Amino acid sequence: MPYVKPPLGGPIGRSRMRLSASSLVAWERGKRDWFLKYKIALKTPKNPEMILGIIIEEALIGLMMESPSSKHIPEKSIWASWMNDVEYVPTDNAPVINSISDLRKWINKKIPDAAKVVWNEGKIKWEKSIYKREDREWEDVGIHLIEKMLTGGIELFLEEITQCFEKKGGPHLEKWRLNGDPFPIPAPCWHKKATHPIPEKVPKHLESNFFDNKYFNNPFTNKGEPNLKEVWEITRPWAKDPRVWQPQRLYHQEGWASGEMDLMLRWEENAKIVDIKASDGKSKYSVGLPIQLRFYGWLIQEIKRISGLKFELSGLEGWYLKVPFRKMVDLIHPSELPEETQRLKNIWKEQQETDRVNSKCPIDGEFNLLSNSLESITPKRWKGESLETICKNLEPEYPYSKILSIPDRLNVKGNISGKWGPLNNHFGELVHGALISNSKRGTVNLTLEESQPNSHHKLSELTDGEYVILDAMPGIWRDMARLYVDEKSKIIPIDEYNEGSQELTRLGRILTKTDIQGLVVSRSLNSGKRLDGRPWTMESCHLWDGEAIIELVAFGSAIGGKFSSLICGDLVKVRSAELGWRNGIPQLRLNPRKTKFEIIEKEDSN
């Protein structure tokens, strides 16, 4: 089964807390780079290839979703029509397919139309990007390159079809002929409606011939030797359906690991995992492919072991589209699985324990900020200055605080009551919470909440009473102070607490706002849909005060024109930024009514 439901209580969306293939690759490259990229979400400037790879993958999947068995098959790409939100134009006749060459000619006719949509869609995304390389432009990407990569992907797929045909349709032929696709989660194709393990996550589409079986002529009606139309349907891999906006991931049952594969070929007795790369395999980043694929292989075998699924893997491959060629990666042997599980879980635990000291920059007297150079993010008037001088210029003056002096964990005492949950927090994640007050009369009342789903499961099990909370995280939401707890927090009954062993902060004296100034060193814009289907938008920047880095975010209505105009190299001052938390790391948030935001000097005005 290619993907499963997320663990109970966990979000279906991306979580920086889980171990994933990409985060594991980053961790293996360097722990501090992992921290900056995954723990505090520092971004590097986009280049066209970062946008192109995602769209190329979706276009290739869209081509594989075509069917030579359609009665009135269109000559142009259905994916391209779907992306443009127009009905495809059917032809009068179904294609004549008697050879692999016929299949190649039929599908390759659709590539130019798909390539145009890839280019146009990439252009739109490039222009909307708020942080991109100034020395690059979308026009660096040529249509011929896109066509070459799509053709390369189809050639690799046709190699699979050839193998399946030579093996007389593979071991599942009779199942296909009897009842169609034999897998619980079928491979996506245009003549069938999209599926998802959680049916309500499939968007409701307008009535369209994109999803109408009347144009599909079932090829599984003959007996004896299979024909190539049958083999195309059998060989089509499982992939993330472009019609479904929700993630379609593998989730470890314990919740600490997840992964989303590109393709899974299932026409043989055992399945094969494929990762699509819109490159030639010569990049320095290609060394991460074995780590990535072996993680997928481990995860699906681990899920199979825990759940009892009857599912076996035969291989792992990376498909490089520019050449094209396959890179084979060795599977983890079943006897190695327990050791690999423990190794990966230890990595995950170490990732959770990393603290914000890792956000310090420079390190050992050098500027080390992912792939960003110091020159690319410092104001023009400081060009040529030494790192020591730049750091000195960024030292905050009163009343502004240094980033590492912003309140971290604290200890409190209070009465806990009124437990609730799981309910949606402001990120749309299901969390538990309660009320904490400074006395039974409740003169000071605060919300106590999990910082992430299932981050402190004991919170839901507490009985009403007085407790001491160690390593709680202070924050504020909608002008109300609140406390967050996670795996590092401890909730101790008052009669088990050793009085005086830790310094306690009074509930009424919790600091939830701060004043900060710094240099903008990263920008990002994200949008999507919450678990309840409502849209969300978030803009963020990362500020560097010459010593450390922190994320400053604005949600929805808090995103103003001034914030959106920020670019790397701007110097800013922020008054009354609200303290929040993500993944155990402080995160500052803009309140549109309370936070004062000032750009000291625009970088592009120098």
Image (cartoon, helix red, strand yellow):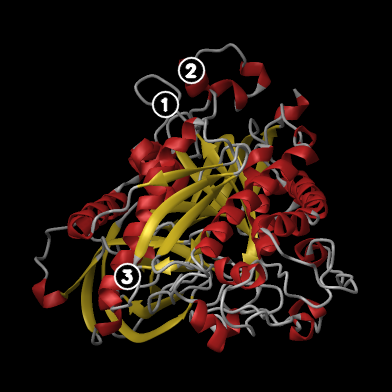
Q: Is residue 189 above or below residue 286?
A: below
Going from N to C along the chain, the mark reached first, 3 or 1, is 3
Camera-side mark, 3 or 1: 3
Check disc 1 and report the residue beneath it: 362
**N-term mark: 1 or 2:** 1
SS of the residue under disc 3 = helix
Tell me, yes or no, if residue 414 can be seen here.
Answer: no
The residue carrying mark 2 is: 387
Nearer to us of marks 2 and 3 is 3
Tell me whether circle 1 and circle 2 mark residues in contact (CB < 8 Å): yes
* Depth check, front residue: 186 or 218: 218
Q: Residues within 10 Å of mark 1 (few under 14, many from 20)?
A: some
- Residue 440 badge: none
Dot 2: few (<14), some (14–19), or many (≥20) neighbours within 10 Å?
some
**Horizontal and vertical percent position of residue 15:** 45, 61
CA separation in Å, label 3 and label 1: 41 Å
Query: Type of residue at label 2?
Result: Leu
Measure the C-alpha gap from mark 2 to mark 3: 49 Å
- Residue 303 circle label: 3
Packing grade of label 3 (10 A; few <14, some 14-19, many >=20) is many
Task: Name the kind of residue labelled 3 in the image.
Answer: Ile
Q: Is residue 187 left or right of residue 171?
A: right
